[in-house]
Image: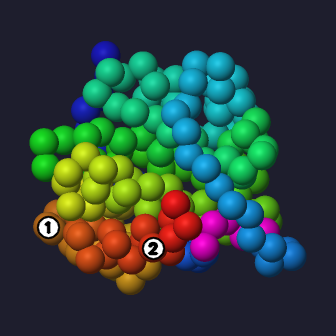
Amino acid sequence: MKSNKETGLGFIIDKLTNSIENVVTGDSFATEISVLTKYDLNTVSKKNRWLFNWKSELSDPKRDVYKLTIVNNPSVIQGLISLEVKTDHVYMHLVESAPFNKSASKMYSGVAGNLVAFACKLSFQRGHDGNVSFISKSQLIEHYEKTLGAFHFGGRIMIIETQAAHKLINKYFQNQ
């Protein structure tokens, strides 16, 4: 039986970039976001060092799972996000950067910010004024306030409202 207990998101916004940025060279790479397919699941498994069960996320009919890739390199997934469109906002269930985009030895920065900006963009597209919510790990509440412009609603609930959503979208999707 699947647990409904929310453990809280623990993604780190390492840097807000205009796309994603190679940590060593500083080169920026344009990205695209598309729906994760069942064919992608072999590459985003726990045996490949991904933390979450993306197969379970993909099988939940209420959730949509999206992958972030570099333009013209769609086979290498840089990060994933699981979203649910609610009646008045978009809810982020999970956000995860690829294993090679985590820790001090990461290849690209800006992955998590890019995915959150996409959630805000989707919220505008669905008529929800950019409003996005998520449950944060307690120790990251202040981090999300500073980096995303999110506000602490109470408990561990975080909300990104219209103005902060516009800033994120303008950062990542200014040419789209």
Q: Which residue occupies 37% across, 57% down?
A: 121
Cβ atoms under marks 2 and 1 closer than 8 Å: no
Say which of 86 and 94 sits in front. Answer: 86
Q: Is residue 42 above or below residue 15?
A: above
Q: Is residue 174 above or below residue 67?
A: below
Q: Is residue 54 above or below residue 85?
A: above
Front of the two marks 2 and 1: 2
Q: Which residue occupies 78% across, 44% down?
A: 73
Q: Is residue 6 visible?
A: yes
Circle 1 SS class:
strand
Q: Amino acid at mark 1?
A: Gly
Say which of 109 and 119 sits in front. Answer: 119
Q: Which residue carries the number 2 mark?
A: 170
Q: Is residue 49 magenta?
A: no
Can you give x and y, in whole percent of width and height, for residue 57 in the image? Answer: 43, 29
Residue 154, label in figure? 1
| Magenta range | 18-22
